[in-house]
Image (cartoon, grey):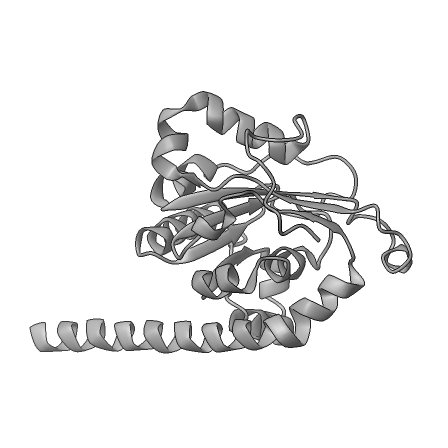
């Protein structure tokens, strides 16, 4: 019985490692094949915080959600040295996408996993996300849970749990990406702002900083006490 248990544990670890390597390679290739072209297509004014290069594996990226291309836009606009350190990145994804046979399987190669369709499954996903962060994996999530074409939606529960388990946190504010696709090539009034990289301990013990970070994400404040780096595009 014990041998079978040990064998199962070892096999699960090998599967997890193999899965992470596949996701790593797919995301690395996507940076050049998919992310960079989208960066050109969805032209925007990029604002990087001065300490953005402190981001490393185990980070939690939190952004508002305006279009289906948001994950690719946010990741593709990171400096490559930061991007590659974060890999592989995991994305909690709506059950509607993950339950589709073809789409779901493709998204899994990109690091997506199902948030679940029932309260019980969503709770399991919450625990899984905490486990991923605790084990040093990077997680990128949209607290609204779905695309908000106009005003931001109410945040889903669990954000505070995720912040507590992460090594560092960065909030990303997207403005103007909810415009019709035909306008994306013509208009350049979009802004992509990466907030200051904060440690989870700082946010957990500083309620004001956490509140300011959420205000930055919702657009109630323009900055969260950080200075833009010189690498703006």
Instruction: Give the percent coordinates (x, y) of residue 70.
Output: 67, 55
Side of 141 relative to 8 (left or right): right
Assign the N terminus to one quadrant of the image.
Answer: bottom left
- 162 and 118: which is toward the camera: 162
**Which residue is located at x 79 percent, y 39 percent?**
150
Residue found at x 52% / y 39%: 196
Residue 53 image point, x, y percent = 48, 52
- Asked if residue 1 shows in the view, the reply is no
Q: Could you say which is closer to the camera, residue 130 or residue 89?
A: 89
Q: Using the rendered image of the protein, determine whether residue 230 is visible from the camera's viewpoint.
A: yes
As drawn, the residue found furthest toward the top would be 208
72 sits left or right of 89 in the view: right
* 110 relative to 69, above or below: below
In the image, farthest residue toward the front: 230
The front one of 35 and 230 is 230
Looking at the image, the residue that sits furthest to the left is 2
Residue 215 position (above or below residue 131): above
Q: Quadrant of residue 21?
A: bottom left
């Amino acid at each position: 019985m014990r041998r079978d248990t040990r064998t199962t544990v070892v096999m699960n670890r090998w599967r997890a490692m193999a899965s992470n390597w596949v996701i790593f390679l797919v995301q690395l290739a996507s940076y050049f094949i998919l992310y960079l072209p989208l960066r050109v297509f969805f032209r925007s004014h990029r604002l990087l915080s001065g300490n953005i290069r402190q981001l490393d594996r185990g980070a939690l990226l939190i952004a508002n959600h305006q279009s289906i291309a948001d994950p690719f836009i946010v990741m593709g606009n990171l400096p490559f040295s930061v991007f590659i350190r974060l890999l592989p990145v995991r994305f909690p994804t709506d059950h509607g996408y993950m339950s589709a046979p073809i789409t779901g399987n493709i998204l899994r190669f990109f690091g997506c996993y199902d948030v679940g369709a029932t309260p019980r499954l969503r709770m399991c996903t919450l625990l899984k996300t905490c486990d991923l962060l605790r084990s040093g994996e990077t997680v990128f999530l949209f607290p609204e849970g779905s695309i908000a074409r106009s005003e931001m939606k109410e945040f889903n529960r669990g954000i505070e749990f995720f912040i507590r388990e992460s090594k560092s946190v960065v909030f990303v504010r997207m403005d103007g990406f909810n415009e019709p696709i035909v306008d994306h090539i013509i208009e350049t009034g979009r802004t992509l702002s990466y907030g200051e990289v904060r440690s989870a301990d700082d946010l957990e013990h500083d309620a004001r900083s956490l509140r300011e970070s959420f205000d930055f994400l919702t657009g109630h404040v323009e900055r969260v006490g950080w200075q833009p780096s010189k690498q703006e595009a």
